[in-house]
Amino acid sequence: MHEPDDLFSPQHYESVRRPIGEAFNLPPWCYTSKRFFDREVERLFGKVWNFVGRAERIARPGDFFTCEVATVPLLIARGADGEARAFANTCRHRGCPVARGEGNVRTFVCPYHSWTYSTSGALMTAPDMDGLVGFDPKDYSLTPVKLESWGGFMFVNLDPHSSSLADYLGNLPALLADYDCSHMALGRRVEYDVPCNWKFYVENLKDAMHIPTVHRNSISRYAPVKKFWREVQKTNGNMVSSFMGYPASAMLFPDDAGFPPIAGLDMEKAGTTAPLIFPNLYISCTVDGAWYIHVNPVAPDRIKLEQGALFPVDSLDRPDRDEVLPRYFRRLDMTQAEDNEICALQHVGISSPLSRPGRYGMKEALVHQTVNWILDRVLDA
């Protein structure tokens, strides 16, 4: 299907904007076009709150890690004062990244000309810059990026004029209050490279219709759609959310023993609450822990996927943790592989010049809501 010259004109998306019972899918070019991808980076990811990692990744002063937010390189660090900060990972001299990977340091030293920065971003030394007119090291700190946290999840916003994270998240803290995310910690964090457009994966995370087929050997074995009810929850932030009435751990196969339930959780009302925080963070909180999936765009046809498994700190302190954790990972890895494969296949199919938009089913209302949230931010006025 040919990409139009006036790619961002609303007229091309009128069929997507219709009510769910009348709506069509996004045109194929939304998943393959470099121009569309670049506009998303600029107008969407450049303006909203983006997840970058769990706070425990930088637990100690001097801890840091590098990452990209939709192709923008960042440095996340905990300063000597204990405060978590985010910076553009680019030296203020000639632009080289000042850090790579992750670790613990006292200073960041640019590998090009040895400009040295403190872990709070201040320029400490700038070799051979003596005698310059009007050069003050205080003016050349690492470029700061807004960073705020909720429940142990750290978010950045590339727009210095954005509203607060609390405003952006709306009623997410209330939806997940019973699961006490701030007292969880990472049991494992893994990354995947998946050859698909980021929207395919985000849509898949809220597509209940694929569970009986794609997950016939995993989720459908213990929580089939026809047996355990799913409910769309009311949200007032930048997200959609659903609740699954399966009363046991959604992170385990039924025959596997796991950790105790989260302290204080009402097991008579227990289940799994699963919000998708726009644009690209999925959190699924169940009776004994949680997992998240972060879909980070790299190119129109590639994502860097991060999956984190979270458990109450008390559970991770148990002497049997190393025996129990692999049971959770077996279930998470199986489902992840199934989703990775189907999203990659979707991208292959949509890339055909013969591809045409299909129709949404009535059970795909959250997918429809998600793509329209994206269009709200990407299209011309």
Image (cartoon, rainbow, N blue to C red):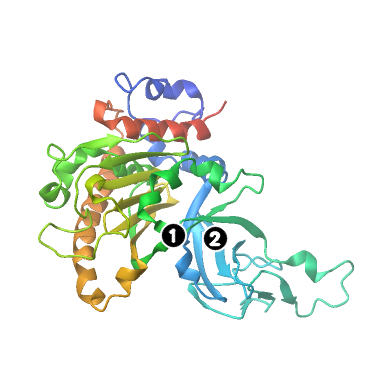
Choose between 321 and 127: the one closer to the eye. 321
From the viewer's perspective, tell me whether residue 71 is left or right of residue 274. Answer: right
Label 1 vs label 2: CA separation? 27 Å
From the viewer's perspective, tell me whether residue 278 is left or right of residue 165. Answer: left
From the viewer's perspective, tell me whether residue 6 is left or right of residue 281. Answer: right
Reading the image, the residue beneath label 1 is: 182
At 60% across and 71% down in the image, what residue appears?
Answer: 82
Reading the image, the residue beneath label 2 is: 73
Secondary structure of the residue carrying tag 1 is helix
Q: Is residue 190 visible?
A: no
Circle 1 packing at 10 Å, graded few (<14), some (14-19), many (20+), is some
Label located before the other in sequence (1 or 2): 2
- For badge 2, the amino acid type reads Pro
Q: Quadrant of the N terminus?
A: top left
At 43% across and 44% down in the image, what residue appears?
Answer: 174
Residue 136 x %, y %: 83, 69
Number of numbered callouts drawn: 2
- For badge 1, the amino acid type reads Ser
